[in-house]
């Protein structure tokens, strides 16, 4: 591999300070300001500054092959137009060194990176990637630096990514055979449609309204669609010139690659700039004066899946201290956890368990990402009559906790969780460090303070030893009424008002163009021409010369996979898989118990069962006591539904329950005891069981429409796939739209009707959960030194389990055949869709060509057609190798009819395409980004344990992927996409607002809501809306 070849001789450990310059010394245009070794994190941090521009640079050296780079800029948003967000998109559309359309997306199939993205935060924007290949790191760093510092920022890119007005279907309108809707003028733009989708989520909307009230100095960086269309191209360019400058930049590198090489490349890119004054302003929330509390009411949409009387959202916030005080910030985070983490926490008991709300508001918790900390507590699902009670309960809880004091054992539990998190070897450690330090770094907080774990904990323990420390912080910040309360009122007309506002705004823009053009006909002609010019520009994307872009090569990929050594044994007649590896003194436990002939009615309730055992408590212990033990003795334990397809036959599947736990080696026996107690002894017959289960249901149902909107394409895929194989059919019942509908139905069941029938089914699941050793298997990952003690603890655990499985009655499975086209009417401003077809099993020779085909279609066709031209936030193809399905999806899509046509034709397009060697090379690189992505030690060997995919199967598939030919890709497209769709074997699902195109050929599925018909339906209505405004 290139990376290893370039290392040469054995080097010193990258964390040794002696090999780095001393503070004050210069290296490749930078001066080292200071350095620090952090032994508890096994890293060395170096803080540098670029001599010419003043750019801030932090390097974290660690023996980790998954190296990370990020460049970020302070981007305080000047208004609500979303200029930082639109700029984040447009910088990636072409640069001086890489003057092609979308070099960022074109790089995706030319890299072996395991992470590439860009993010717009509230007051900064950053561009990170991670890769294990040294040449790949250099390539991507060059692209990222040029994209951010030297973007082309063309007006067409602003129109594509930001916003524009144009005909719905310009090509059809030009051809002269257009339908009325093709010529209809609409707002377009990738970010515009992304944020319309975001605003469909009532939880997100509430959070943004909250921020507007408590932090008016920070505008909506993502952009409010109602304001976004005020942004001009000139304003975008000006914002870039002022903010995307090295003097306003913070650069971060992490891993085991040499720092000197990074600095050399960065200095080359930065040295062409002169130093300017960066945007160093640290903005602060409002001042809440001493005269008393402030309260604000805002309006939001109703959730049609939730009881109309329980739709208020309310939260109260306190301003805390300056977050540069690292000890106090850490301590306030612990207070927040002690007050509200878990079902036994004081705030949960006095707010949600008391029936004042169903779930926390999105802003709940201690937010330390700004210069001033903000502590907020709020609940959703509130009745209007209970609004005032929420704040009273908050004050009463704080006073009670302050008076009684915090239990030291609960504090010890929190510190124990921290200890385990430090020991856990995650594959994404570098990205985690970036996420931890970045927000505070942009607020002027010393990044070294964010890494000083032991120093902070020692200082905390010193203060705790004095007594009354946490109670004193409560008195300082929370025992007062200097508060801001934000309440969202559910408004049945909210969506209509949003539609009316957009129609009026659109009419105004059309009127402005008409005035300038001299007539409406000329205005339409101009807008149509601009749209066609953009389409023409976009069309060049698929044919342009990409030779200027750097790339790694398939030859850099090892043909032999890295083998993870595991061994098998039997303990108490149960199969055990052992993975012995350095784990920092941790043991990872996994178990699967398979069920046969599981009734549909029990399967659908397993998610509720796994929630209930973490909520109800047992006959001899409350949930609070159990939670305290879990935190003191483990790093977390869990139970969940399990299902897997067979790698030998994708139409066969197994199901059951899985169990997992992470624990310090010394506490393995305690973990097993806790797991057994939770699963087998949870008391479903207690007096409080029904009310607590109802609260779980209401909490899950609350905001369901918004939750679907956040990942609507996943729900669409799940429902489409459910009509193809048994695995997807049963998975959809427990995690798809069917589960959402079931939970919403149970949550809205009248209290008088009770939940006795549900509880009987939960008890039936309890009897099955850990019974039957013949269907039980386990996996343990630990250090060699812990194997014998773990084996003894496991034997004791297994010997205490029920020996016989109570077989449920076998009942006939319902008919789960699907209409070929299904539509779910939901109140969204954009659409989510999927199309799926059945394919082959994991071991089939056709699996590898299908996986390559999915990458080819995504990068060479669908991204271009659905996102660039169609304006959707995302779209692509996928191949589920283990589960035997090939499919397509679109996300936050304003133009579903166009997308349907594109994905239906995609297979034939692939068959007719003259693929090049370069196309195939890029597709293989894309596949191996995930195939060879670094794994956390806890995940090693899990494919084998969970799904039965052996090393030989994976090696055979690896070789097939490397050897796929263009002819095989075409054959796979014809046989598994084109032909099945012709035979009607595909399943298509779309979610969104029902319009005329959803005709009688679609099966409309009711989610238990009646979506309101849109008030604005055509351009005459748009004109009327404008006149009315």
Image (cartoon, rainbow, N blue to C red):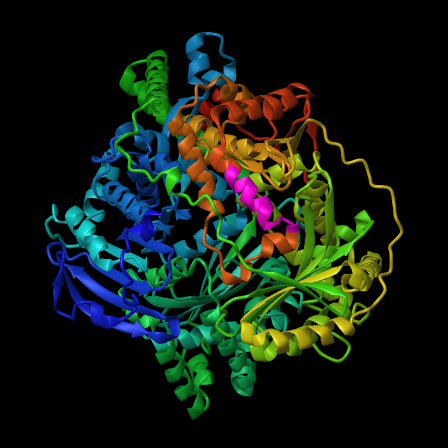
Q: Residue at x 46, y 13 (%)?
A: 172
Determine whether 508 is above or below 176 in the image.
below
Tell me residue 445's x, y (percent). Answer: 29, 67
In the rendered image of this protein, does residue 252 appear above or below residue 300? below
Left or right placement of residue 687 versus residue 310 in this view: right
Residue that appears at 38% across and 78% down: 454
In terms of secondary structure, what is the magenta stretch mainly? helix
| Magenta span | 947-959
Looking at the image, residue 811 lies above or below residue 167: below
Answer above or below: position of 304 versus 698: above
Image mark count = 0
Give how far across and how far down residue 835 sits, in percent: 60, 30
Left or right placement of residue 318 versus residue 90 in this view: right
Q: Is residue 513 magenta?
A: no
Q: Residue at x 38, y 25 (%)?
A: 165
Q: Position of residue 70 (x, y in %)?
A: 31, 52
Q: Residue furthest top?
A: 176
Q: Nearer the viewer, residue 998 or 599?
A: 599
Query: Looking at the image, which residue is at 53% across and 72% down?
Result: 586
Quarter of the image for the C terminus: give it: top left
Residue 557 image point, x, y percent: 41, 43
Q: Which sits in the foreground, 161 or 22? A: 22
**Residue 323 visible within the image:** no
Q: Outermost residue toward the bottom?
A: 466
Q: Is residue 954 magenta?
A: yes
- The residue furthest right is 809
**Can see residue 910?**
yes
Of residues 355 and 695, the one drawn nearer to the viewer in this rendering: 695
Q: Nearer the viewer, residue 642 or 867?
A: 642
């Amino acid at each position: 591999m290139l990376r290893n070849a370039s290392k040469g001789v054995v080097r010193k450990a990258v964390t040794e300070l002696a090999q780095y310059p001393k503070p004050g010394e210069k290296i490749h245009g930078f001066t080292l300001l200071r350095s620090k070794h952090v032994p508890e994190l096994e890293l060395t941090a170096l803080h540098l500054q670029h001599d010419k521009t003043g750019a801030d640079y932090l390097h974290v050296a660690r023996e980790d092959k998954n190296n990370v780079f990020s460049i970020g800029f302070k981007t305080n948003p000047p208004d609500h137009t979303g200029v930082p967000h639109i700029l984040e998109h447009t910088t990636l559309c072409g640069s001086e060194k890489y003057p092609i359309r979308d070099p960022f997306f074109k790089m995706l199939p030319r890299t072996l990176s395991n992470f590439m993205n860009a993010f717009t935060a509230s007051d900064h924007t950053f561009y990170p990637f991670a890769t294990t290949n040294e040449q790949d790191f250099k390539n991507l760093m060059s692209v990222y630096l040029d994209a951010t510092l030297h973007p082309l920022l063309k007006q067409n890119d602003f129109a594509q990514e930001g916003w524009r007005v144009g005909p719905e279907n310009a090509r059809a309108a030009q051809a002269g055979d257009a339908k009325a809707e093709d010529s209809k003028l609409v707002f377009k733009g990738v970010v515009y449609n992304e944020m319309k989708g975001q605003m469909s989520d009532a939880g997100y909307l509430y959070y943004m309204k909250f921020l507007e009230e408590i932090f008016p100095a920070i505008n909506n960086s993502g952009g409010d669609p109602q304001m976004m269309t005020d942004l001009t191209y000139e304003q975008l360019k000006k914002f870039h010139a002022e903010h995307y400058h090295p003097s306003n930049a913070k650069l971060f590198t992490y891993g085991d690659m040499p720092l000197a090489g990074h600095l050399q490349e960065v200095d080359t890119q930065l040295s062409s700039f002169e130093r300017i004054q960066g945007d160093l302003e640290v903005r602060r929330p409002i001042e809440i004066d001493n005269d008393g509390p402030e309260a604000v009411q805002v309006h939001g949409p109703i959730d049609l899946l939730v009881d109309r009387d329980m739709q208020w959202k309310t939260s109260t916030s306190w301003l805390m201290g300056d977050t540069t005080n690292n000890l106090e910030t850490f301590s306030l985070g612990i207070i927040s956890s002690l007050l509200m983490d878990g079902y036994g926490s004081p705030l949960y008991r006095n707010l949600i368990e008391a029936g004042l709300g169903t779930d926390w508001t999105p802003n709940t918790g201690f937010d330390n990402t700004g210069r001033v900390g903000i502590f907020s507590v709020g609940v959703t699902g509130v009745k209007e009559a209970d609004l005032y009670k929420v704040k009273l309960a908050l004050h009463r809880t704080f006073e009670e906790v302050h008076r009684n004091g915090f239990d030291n054992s609960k504090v010890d539990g929190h510190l124990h969780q921290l200890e385990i998190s430090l020991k856990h070897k995650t594959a994404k450690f570098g990205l985690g460090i970036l996420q931890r330090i970045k927000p505070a770094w942009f607020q002027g907080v010393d990044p070294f303070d964010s890494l000083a774990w032991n120093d902070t904990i020692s200082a905390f323990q010193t203060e705790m030893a004095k007594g009354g420390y946490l109670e004193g912080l409560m008195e300082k910040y929370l025992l007062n009424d200097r508060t801001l309360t934000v309440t969202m009122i559910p408004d049945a007309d909210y969506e209509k008002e949003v539609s009316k506002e957009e129609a009026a705004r659109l009419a105004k823009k059309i009127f402005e163009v008409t005035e300038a053009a001299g007539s409406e006909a000329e205005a339409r002609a101009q807008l149509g021409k601009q749209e066609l010019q953009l389409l023409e520009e976009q069309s060049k994307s698929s044919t342009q010369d990409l030779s200027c872009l750097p790339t790694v090569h398939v030859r850099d990929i090892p043909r032999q996979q890295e083998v993870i050594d595991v061994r098998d044994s039997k303990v108490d007649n149960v199969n055990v898989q052992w993975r012995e590896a350095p784990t920092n003194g941790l043991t990872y436990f996994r178990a699967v118990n398979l069920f046969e002939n599981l009734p549909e009615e029990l399967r659908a309730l397993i998610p509720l069962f796994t929630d209930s055992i973490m909520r109800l408590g047992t006959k001899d212990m409350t949930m609070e006591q159990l939670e305290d033990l879990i935190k003191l003795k483990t790093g977390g334990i869990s139970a969940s539904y399990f299902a897997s397809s067979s790698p030998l036959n994708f139409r066969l599947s197994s199901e059951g329950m899985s169990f997992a736990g992470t624990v310090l080696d010394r506490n393995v026996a305690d973990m097993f005891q806790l797991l057994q107690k939770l699963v087998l002894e949870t008391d479903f017959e207690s007096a409080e069981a029904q009310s607590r289960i109802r609260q779980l249901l209401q909490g899950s149902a609350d905001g369901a429409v918004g939750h679907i909107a956040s990942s609507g394409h996943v729900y669409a895929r799940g429902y489409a796939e459910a009509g193809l194989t048994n695995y997807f059919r049963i998975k959809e019942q427990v995690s798809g739209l069917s589960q959402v509908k079931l939970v919403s139905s149970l949550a809205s069941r009248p209290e008088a009707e009770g939940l006795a029938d549900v509880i009987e089914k939960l008890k039936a699941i309890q009897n099955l959960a850990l019974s039957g050793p013949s269907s039980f298997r386990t996996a343990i990952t630990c250090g060699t030194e812990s194997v014998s003690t773990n084996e003894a603890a496991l034997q004791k655990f297994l010997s205490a389990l029920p020996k016989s499985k109570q077989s449920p009655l076998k009942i006939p499975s319902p008919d789960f055949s699907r209409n070929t086209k299904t539509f779910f009417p939901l109140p969204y401003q954009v659409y989510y869709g999927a199309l799926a077809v059945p394919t082959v099993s994991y071991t089939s020779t056709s699996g590898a060509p299908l996986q390559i085909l999915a990458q080819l279609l995504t990068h060479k066709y669908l991204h271009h057609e659905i996102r660039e031209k169609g304006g959707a936030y995302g779209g692509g193809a996928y191949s589920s190798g283990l589960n035997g399905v090939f499919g397509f999806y679109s996300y936050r899509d304003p133009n579903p009819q166009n997308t349907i046509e594109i994905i239906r034709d995609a297979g034939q397009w692939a068959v007719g395409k003259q693929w090049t060697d370069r196309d195939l090379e890029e597709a293989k690189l894309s596949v191996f980004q995930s195939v060879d992505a670094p794994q956390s030690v806890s995940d090693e060997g899990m494919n084998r344990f969970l799904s039965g995919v052996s090393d030989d199967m994976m090696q055979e598939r690896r070789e097939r992927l490397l050897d796929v030919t263009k002819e095989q890709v075409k054959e796979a497209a014809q046989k598994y996409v084109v032909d099945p769709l012709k035979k009607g074997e595909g399943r298509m699902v779309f979610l969104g607002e029902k319009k005329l195109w959803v005709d009688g050929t679609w099966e409309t599925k009711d989610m238990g809501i009646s979506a309101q018909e849109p008030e604005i339906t055509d351009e005459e209505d748009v004109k009327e809306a404008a006149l009315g405004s």
